[in-house]
Image: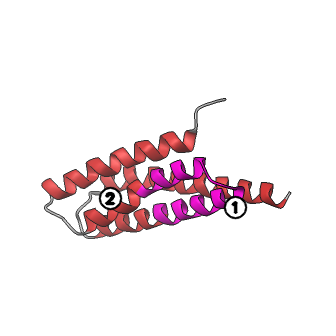
Amino acid sequence: MGENLIKKKSFDFAIRIVKLFQYLQFEKKEYVLSKQLMRSGTAVGALTREAEHAESKSDFVHKMAIAQKEINETIYWLELLKSTDYLSSEQFESMNKDAVELIKMITSIIKTAKVSIKK
């Protein structure tokens, strides 16, 4: 069995979020938006981990759907931080690229899981 790609990518993303949080807090002195970003950005990996041990396929889909909402919220906070000049275009593009990749992966996982439930 191969590596769990969503597990790795969501964990790596969480690390980037923690580092961005530290940068925003210590360098930019931004304390409110950064906490929101930290909460939603790290929740994605935690939820995908929870989904690994779901009680049923429906529970798995539910947990992944919450992860999907969290990554979507994270994209919102990234956009807001860029629009308020807390993030440069380069910083935003780098983080947003990873977030969009995650939301696409999670959406695909949910669709696949829903098909298997209907069978």
Identify residue type, mark 2: Met
Residue 26 is situated, as x and y percent measured from the top left of the image, at: 13, 54
The residue stretch that appears in magenta: 43-71
Residue 31 is situated, as x and y percent measured from the top left of the image, at: 19, 65
Residue 11 is situated, as x and y percent measured from the top left of the image, at: 43, 44
The prevailing secondary structure element of the residues shown in magenta is helix
Q: Is residue 56 visible?
A: yes
Q: Nearer the viewer, residue 48 or 19?
A: 48
Q: Which mark is residue 38?
A: 2
55 magenta-colored: yes
- Mark 2 vs mark 1, CA separation in Å: 28 Å
Q: Which mark is residue 58?
A: 1
Q: Residue at x 39, y 57 (%)?
A: 41
- Quarter holding the C terminus is bottom right
Q: Earlier in the sequence, mark 2 or mark 1?
A: 2
In this rendering, the answer to whether 3 lies above or below 24 is: above
Judge from the rendering whether residue 114 lies leftward or rightward of residue 105; answer left or right: right
Judge from the rendering whether residue 88 lies leftward or rightward of residue 70; answer left or right: left
